[in-house]
Amino acid sequence: MKTHSLISLLCLLLCSCSSWLPPLEERTESRHFNTSKPVRLDNILQIRHTPRNNGLSDIYLLNDPHEAFAARAALIESAEHSLDLQYYIWRNDISGRLLFNLIYLAAERGVRVRLLLDDNNTRGLDDLLLALDSHPNIEVRLFNPFVLRKWRALGYLTDFARLNRRMHNKSFTADNRATILGGRNIGDEYFKVRNDTVFADLDILATGSVVSEVSYDFDRYWASHSAYNATHIIRRGDIPHGLQELGYDDETARQALLRYRETIEQSSLYRKIQNRQIDWQSVQTRLISDDPDKGLDRDSRKPPIADRLQNALKQPEKNVYLVSPYFVPTKSGTQALAKLVQNGIGVTVLTNSLQATDVAAVHSGYAKYRKPLLHSGIKLYELQPNHAVPSTKDKGLTGSSVTSLHAKTFIVDGKRIFIGSFNLDPRSARLNTEMGVVIESPLIAGKMERTLAQTTPSYAYRVTLDKHNRLQWYDPATQKTYSNEPEAKLWKRIAAKILSLLPIEGLL
């Protein structure tokens, strides 16, 4: 009898999880900062275009991880009025803590901070988020939050349809004057704090027209039906402990932070900002972003982001270069790429090898399409882990030794380029919200395409088929050909094979 009662109670608790979400009416309304009066960033970044400048923006490619961090730190330290920050992942590590601390200091000098985080990766951050939110100038909201903070996995049992939809967007905007958007989350692996894990990634620092687009887009997400006040979700946080974390009370952590800060101050972009000498590229831009209603599966009447992205990039005439760390083309996508080749369009794909990927399940979804892709004439490359990617400033990805690919960029005809959060997989297309920018620039797109074409073979395996229709991986550096997934241990290859047999493609 007692066992039956406990089971009934557990079922009742689980079934009511989704109904525990607080009412949205308790939120306060706010919108992005908007003024024509001069701000400090106008001088520091030598801003030439207004936010309403007919699609014209100045951009600076952030392919170097240290420059990517320096740009974010500079925006926080230079902001006078507002910071609007939207991220899928914000880790409580050296880089994440340093940026959290800078945000708190900005709030102390009167800057209004709106921080919108997807709740899927905030485990262990509750105290720190409440500490930030306790400041009168900082408000933290969580997108599609987990009501059960400690036993989050239980939420999937009763609220899977909502919790399976995540906010994958990444934007970082200061004073509605400058923004950073692209593929990077906030965490040590994105900013090369340590050498053991470094992601090859790509962002842009931008001023001008795209900034206004990002600001309006942020307002949509901030006021969406999926964004909840952190204080209404986190019921048992320890604010004093969170404030201690912000204050770096641990001496070892403090020294690590200081060393990284010194590294950042030696970066090229940091010096350019100090000297007011950023070498901007003036280009036409267009923001592509999902409607936040996608987070609740309420956007079925709106054009899918994949369609809008394809329209913005336009029909290719010569070639397409696709860089996607998580590449699951699906049957229809494979057929679409094959059709391009049939029409005389060259198609090249760069993705992660099994050993390089940080999500083996996604690789298993991609692996089954390798042979059809190769049979159709598509060039296929897979990143080698722990290999140096040549420095290609303003042309490519990164100048570091990297362990995994994380950049999402598509180049069409050497004229147009997309940089953002969108992966070529079903999850980005149908489940997660995504964003990015399409840039019209033969100079930037052309340089990046040529550099990728020239350098990719030096740090990626060329995947081909042998005369017996078996996959093989060629390493040009050693001139060695592999017949199995290179560098991947047997257990990892077996696990990927098992995962490929499961009916999970729609979730990848």
Image (cartoon, rainbow, N blue to C red):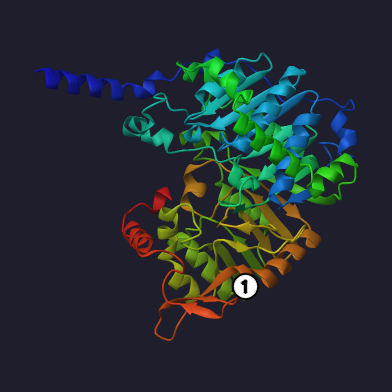
Decide which of 24, 470 is in the foreground and name it. 470
Which residue is painted at 90% across and 46% down in the image? 277
Image x and y of residue 384, in percent: 55, 65
> Disc 1 residue type?
Pro
Image x and y of residue 197, in percent: 56, 51
Dividing the picture into quadrants, the one containing residue 213 is top right
Which residue is painted at 60% across and 60% down in the image? 323
Which residue is painted at 49% across and 38% down in the image? 166
Q: Looking at this view, name the residue that lies furthest to the left.
A: 1
At numbered mark 1, what does the secondary structure look like: helix, strand or loop? helix
Q: Is residue 500 left or right of residue 243?
A: left
Decide which of 114, 343 is in the foreground and name it. 114
Above or below, comparing residue 359 to residue 485 in the picture: above
Above or below, comparing residue 101 to residue 196 in the picture: above
Dividing the picture into quadrants, the one containing residue 343 is bottom right
Dividing the picture into quadrants, the one containing residue 116 is top right
Above or below, comparing residue 404 to residue 218 in the picture: below
Q: Residue tagged by mark 1?
A: 457
